[in-house]
Every structure is written in structure tokens, then in C-alpha cells.
Image (cartoon, rainbow, N blue to C red):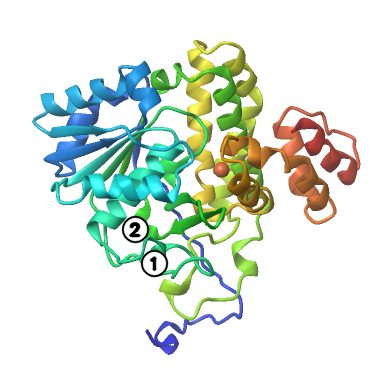
């Protein structure tokens, strides 16, 4: 596309435009039972349920989802081979499993790993490519753009953390390269999400904490990301990055999410059956998925090389350990934003100088 085609009436060297993106979703206790209705509505006749062994063997969630689909006349099969923190070799096996089976839609049931695996199955089955790395962002991969819309993907998260049901990104570990990398494209955004707090009750405290802190880090990084108007204006609309930087709409989402996480993460950790805490954490994680729009930065960037060497650590832990140092670095740059984060996390900032208030964000984290 020629850049002159997009010469706006008002010209500025920096971008003046931000995108507003939020996946369509339904929220509430019991909403996962409506999956059959929504799958049919989206035109799905034969679905692959993508989940992991732990959920499939220790809960009835995937088999129940299969039942709901079949009751609505949608054929469904379960694939429970998702690797927690997806690695390329396992994702390739998952793609091979799905190839040639004519699934016309995907249902992801689980945490970010299942959702990201479902996104990648959908991408590579719909638009096969000779090398798995073709769609991965450069410099590691070829950065090939996704050629067109994917098949419908309905996400049913069972953790309150990644917000992956609300992002156009899939993360994968490249085992040989010891690197965690991402595939991001607007077409990777799921079609729909069913957010059922009841499904998060089975999450043990350790994973409640690690996924919850991941959600908080998304919000903090999103809120302190370089604003969209500080980026050069792209030559054409298709060159505008998926991560556009902080903007007034993502700010609203993440401010609310930070407040909810500050209030409810400890409660959900101490009492897994506290449905009010589970409900608010799931909502917060979903709102925090606004990072798929604004973008995360320092702590997530630092987490990738850590995770590349320590596959045993949950994503949230690899992100959170550098959180306080990141906030220290950001203190002189965006003190007002840090002061607001501290306040949202319950710190008293009234009467303090701005730098004193900003320093409390690190304490609160
Ligand atoms: Fe994350």
C-alpha cells in the first residue's frame, strides 16, 4: 500500500490514532453452559476442545463442555495434550493432531497455555506454512503476517491471569533456542469468551497467586507503557503495531483491574471457594487483557529469557520477580502513574509528595 493513500487531513509525525479492541464476551456463574448456543451461533458444527491433561483428568470441566456442545448438535472432540507454558515441539504435535480433521471451530478450556495453543492450532491448520517459525515475530522468526481471518475460537478460561482470551497474541517457548517468543496479529484475537467464575474455583492457591500476579503485572505494564501518541505515525494502517501503547481506553480498564486485584487476589488465595473473590479476579484478568492492545514491557521482556531457562516456573512468577525493580526504574519517569497504582492497591497517598507516593507502588507490589 502506498503511504500517500493514507495522508490524513491532519498531519503529525507521531501517530494520532489508537485502536479500541475488546473481545466479545459473556460473564457470570454458569455461563459456560451456554457454549453450545454460542458455538452454533458462530457457525461451528465440529469443534476441537483444546485443554490440558491436568484439567481433563482432575475436573469434569472439558467433558461437561463437550456435553453442552453435543446437546446443541455440535460434534466435539477433546485434545488434552496442551503443554503448560507451550513449547514448540508440543504445539507442532497439537497442530499435527488437528490437521485434516475438518474442525470448523475451536474451544479453548484452561489457562493461557490452552488458549494460546488453541490460537496456534487454529492459525497453522487454517494457513499451513512450511516452517513453524514463519509466523513468529522477527528477529527469531519470519514475521509472516496472518493471511486472513481464522476459524471461530471460543475461550473458556479456568484461571484468572493471562487475559489471553482478550488478546491477539500467542506465546511459545522455542526449546532449541531457549527463547520465549510471541506470534501477534489482529486475526489471532479470539471470536468470543465465556467467563465463568465457577470454573476458577478448582485452581490451587499456588496457581491462583502466580496467575493473579501475572494479571496485575499486565495492568501495571499496560498503564505505564509509552503512550500511543509517542510512536511515529505508521506509513499505512496495516503497519500500525498490535501493541499501540497506553491510551485512554486501556487506562480505564486497567485502573479498575488493579483496584480489583489489590482487593481480591489475597482473598482468592486464602479461600478458593470465595466466589466473590473469584468473580472479581476473573473480571480483573479479563480487563487486564487490555494489554493486548496497549502492550507490556520491561518485566514481561525480562521474563522471557528467565522462562527460556527455567521451564518449571509459572509465567506469573517469572514476570513478577523483576516487578519491584521495574517500578524503581519507572519512578522518575512516570511518577504520577505509579502514585495512582499505589493508591489503587490500597496505599494512602494523601498529603505525600508525588515521588513519595510513587515509591509506594513498589511497596504495594
Ligand atoms: Fe503475562
Residue at point 28%, 51% (across, down): 122
The extreme front residue here reads 176
Quarter of the figure with the C terminus? top right
Which residue, as the protein is rendered here, is positioned at the far left?
A: 73
Q: Residue 79 lies in what quarter of the image? A: top left
Cβ atoms at labels 2 and 1 below 8 Å apart: no
Cα gap from disc 2 to disc 1, whole angstroms: 16 Å
The residue tagged 2 is 187
330 left or right of 128 in image? right
Question: Would you say 95 lies left or right of 357 here?
Answer: left
Relative depth, front residue between 113 and 364: 113
Q: Measuring from the top left, give residue 8's x and y in whole percent.
A: 47, 81
Residue 134 point in image, percent of width and height: 39, 67
145, 82: nearer the viewer:
82
Determine whether, in the image, residue 106 is placed left or right of residue 335: left
Nearer the observer: mark 2 or 1; the answer is 1
Residue 214 picture quarter: top right
Asked whether the viewer can see residue 256, the reply is: no
Q: Residues within 10 Å of mark 2 (few under 14, many from 20)?
A: some
The quarter of the picture showing ligand 1: top right
Label 2 sits on a secondary structure element that is helix
Indicate the position of residue 182 as horizontal and vertical percent values.
Answer: 49, 56
Circle 1 is placed at which residue position? 134
Q: Position of residue 236 (x, y in %)?
A: 44, 78
* Secondary structure category for the residue under label 1: helix
Along the polypeptide, which appears first: circle 2 or circle 1? 1
From this view, report whether residue 160 is shown above or below residue 11.
above
Total residue callouts: 2
Judge by depth and name the residue closer to the eye, 24 or 92.
Answer: 92
Amino acid at each position: 500500500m502506498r503511504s500517500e493513500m493514507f495522508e490524513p487531513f491532519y498531519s503529525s509525525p507521531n501517530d494520532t490514532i489508537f485502536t479500541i479492541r475488546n473481545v466479545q464476551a459473556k460473564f457470570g456463574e454458569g455461563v459456560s453452559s451456554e457454549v453450545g448456543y454460542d458455538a452454533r451461533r458462530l457457525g461451528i458444527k465440529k469443534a476441537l476442545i483444546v485443554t490440558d491433561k491436568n484439567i481433563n483428568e482432575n475436573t469434569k470441566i472439558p467433558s461437561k463442555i463437550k456435553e453442552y456442545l453435543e446437546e446443541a448438535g455440535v460434534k466435539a472432540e477433546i485434545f488434552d495434550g496442551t503443554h503448560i507454558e507451550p513449547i514448540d515441539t508440543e504445539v507442532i504435535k497439537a497442530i499435527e493432531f488437528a490437521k485434516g480433521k475438518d474442525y470448523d471451530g475451536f474451544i479453548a478450556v484452561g489457562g493461557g497455555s490452552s488458549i494460546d495453543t488453541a490460537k496456534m492450532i487454529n492459525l497453522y491448520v487454517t494457513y499451513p506454512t512450511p516452517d513453524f517459525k514463519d509466523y513468529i515475530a522477527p528477529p527469531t522468526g519470519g514475521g509472516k503476517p496472518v493471511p486472513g481471518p481464522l476459524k471461530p475460537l471460543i475461550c473458556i478460561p479456568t484461571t484468572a491471569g493471562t487475559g489471553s482470551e482478550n488478546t491477539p497474541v500467542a506465546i511459545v517457548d522455542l526449546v532449541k533456542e531457549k527463547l520465549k517468543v510471541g506470534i501477534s496479529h489482529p486475526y489471532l484475537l479470539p471470536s468470543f469468551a465465556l467467563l465463568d467464575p465457577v470454573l476458577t474455583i478448582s485452581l490451587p492457591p499456588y496457581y491462583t497467586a502466580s496467575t493473579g500476579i501475572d494479571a496485575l503485572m499486565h495492568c501495571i505494564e499496560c498503564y505505564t507503557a509509552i503512550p500511543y501518541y509517542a510512536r511515529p505515525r505508521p506509513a499505512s494502517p496495516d503497519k500500525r503495531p498490535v501493541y499501540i501503547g497506553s491510551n485512554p481506553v486501556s487506562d480505564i480498564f486497567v485502573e479498575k483491574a488493579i483496584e480489583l486485584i489489590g482487593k481480591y487476589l489475597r482473598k482468592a488465595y486464602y479461600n478458593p471457594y470465595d466466589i466473590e473473590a473469584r468473580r472479581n479476579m476473573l473480571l480483573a484478568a479479563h480487563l487486564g487483557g487490555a494489554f493486548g492492545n496497549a502492550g507490556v514491557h520491561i518485566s514481561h521482556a525480562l521474563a522471557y529469557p528467565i522462562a527460556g531457562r527455567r521451564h518449571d516456573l509459572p509465567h506469573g512468577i517469572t514476570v513478577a520477580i523483576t516487578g519491584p525493580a521495574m517500578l524503581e526504574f519507572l519512578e522518575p519517569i512516570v511518577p504520577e502513574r505509579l502514585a495512582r497504582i499505589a493508591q489503587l492497591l490500597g496505599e494512602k497517598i494523601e498529603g505525600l509528595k508525588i515521588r513519595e507516593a510513587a515509591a509506594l507502588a513498589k511497596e504495594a507490589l
